[in-house]
Amino acid sequence: MAATLLAAVVAIALGHLAPGLAAAVRRFEGFGHWLRWLGAQFPEGSFWRSRWGLMLAVTPPLLVMAGLQVGLQRVLWGLPGLMLGMVVLFLCWGPRDLDGDVTAILGAPDADAQRVEAGRLFVGGVAPSMDGPVLVEAVFGNALRRWWGPLFWFCLLGPVGALLYRLSALAVEHGSDALPAATADGAGVWLALLDWPVVQLATLALALVGNFDAVAATWRVQGAMGLRGGLLGSAARASVRSEIAEEVADRADAGLPVAVVLAEVFGNFPELRDAMSLAWRVLVLWLAVLALIVLAGWVG
C-alpha cells in the first residue's frame, strides 16, 4: 500500500510540475490503431464483433503487463516493481491535467473561447455546454476517468488494474470510430462495471467532504438506478448547489444583493470552481485514507 500511495503522489506531482512531459508520454494512439486493425481482420459474426469483443483487444497488453508485474515483484527488493507501478500509474493518469482544463475555461477571454476550452471536458462526440450543472457533471466525470478510476483499480490490482481501466475507458471514448456497434455496446457495459465501485466510493467521499445531507438525499433516489444511473453527477450537482447557497446566504447577511455576492465570491462559473474544489477534496480524502492504512501497517 505504501507503493500505491507513492505512485499516486508521483503521478499527481509530475502531472502538475511537468505538464509537457505528461502530454508527451500519455499517448495511446497505438491502442486506437490496434482496435482498427482488429476491426479489419475479423468479419461479421466473429467474436470481435460481439459484446465481448473488447476482451480480444485488451487481453494481450494486460498479459504483458501482468508478466512484468509478477516478474519484477521480488527482484532487487521490489524496487523495479515499484518503479513499474509509478510509471504505469503516471501514464494512465489523465491523460490531460483536469486543473489545467478548468483554469483554461475560467481564464478564456470570451464566450466562444470558453466553449472551445470546455470542449476538452466533453469526450465521445458530446457537444460542450456552458450550463453550470452540466459543467459540474463534466468535472466529476473527468475526475472519475482521469483520477479516481485509475487510482482505485491500481490499488486493487496494481499496474494491471490501472492499465485495464485506462484501455477500457479509451475504447469507450473512441468506440464510435474504432469499434463495431455490438463491441462498443459491450465495452460501455464493461466500463460501467469498472466504474460502479469507484462511483460508490467517490460519492461516499463527496458526502464526507461536501454537503452530507444533499448527497445522501441524492443517493437514496439515484442509488437504485443501476450501473448508468448518474449517481455521481447528480450527487455532485446537489452538493455544489448546496455549498453555493450556503456561501451566498452567509455573504448576503451583510446586506449585499445576491448577484453582487456571486460576483465577489465566485466570479464567473461558480459551479465550475466549486466542482473543482470538491473533486480535489475527494482525491485528498482518498490519499489520506491510503496514508492512514500505510501508517497502520507500519505501527502494526
Image (tube, grey):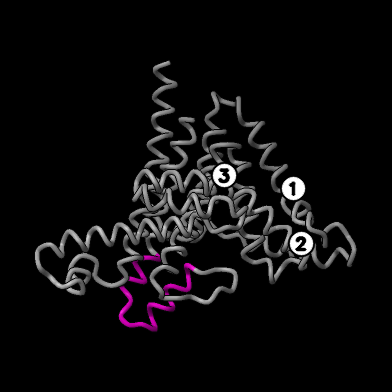
Q: Give the range drawn in magenta.
A: 101-121
Mark with earlier residue (2, 3): 2
CB under 8 Å between discs 3 and 1: no
CB under 8 Å between discs 2 and 3: no
* Residue bearing the label numbered 1: 59
Side of 102 where 48 appears, left or right: right
Side of 164 where 128 appears, left or right: left
In space, the residues marked 2 and 3 are separated at their CA atoms by 23 Å
Question: Along the line of sight, which residue is nearer the eye, 106 or 239?
Answer: 239
Q: Position of residue 253 (x, y in %)?
A: 12, 62
Q: Position of residue 189 (x, y in %)?
A: 68, 56
Residue 17 inside the magenta-drawn segment = no
Q: Where is residue 39 in the image (x, y as percent from the top left)?
A: 80, 66
In space, the residues marked 2 and 1 are separated at their CA atoms by 15 Å
Mark with earlier residue (2, 1): 1
Mark drawn on residue 31: none
* Residue bearing the label numbered 3: 197
Badge 2: residue crowd in 10 Å (few <14, some 14–19, many ≥20): many
Residue at the image point whose x is 41% and y is 50% from the top: 14
Label 2 sits on what residue type?
Thr
Quarter occupied by residue 98: bottom left
In this rendering, the label closer to the viewer, 2 or 3: 3
Element marked by disc 2: helix
* Residue bearing the label numbered 2: 183
Label 3 sits on what residue type?
Pro
Label 1 sits on what residue type?
Thr
Quarter occupied by residue 113: bottom left
Q: Residue furthest left?
A: 254
Residue at the image point whose x is 32% and y is 82% from the top: 110
Is residue 271 in sight in this rendering?
yes
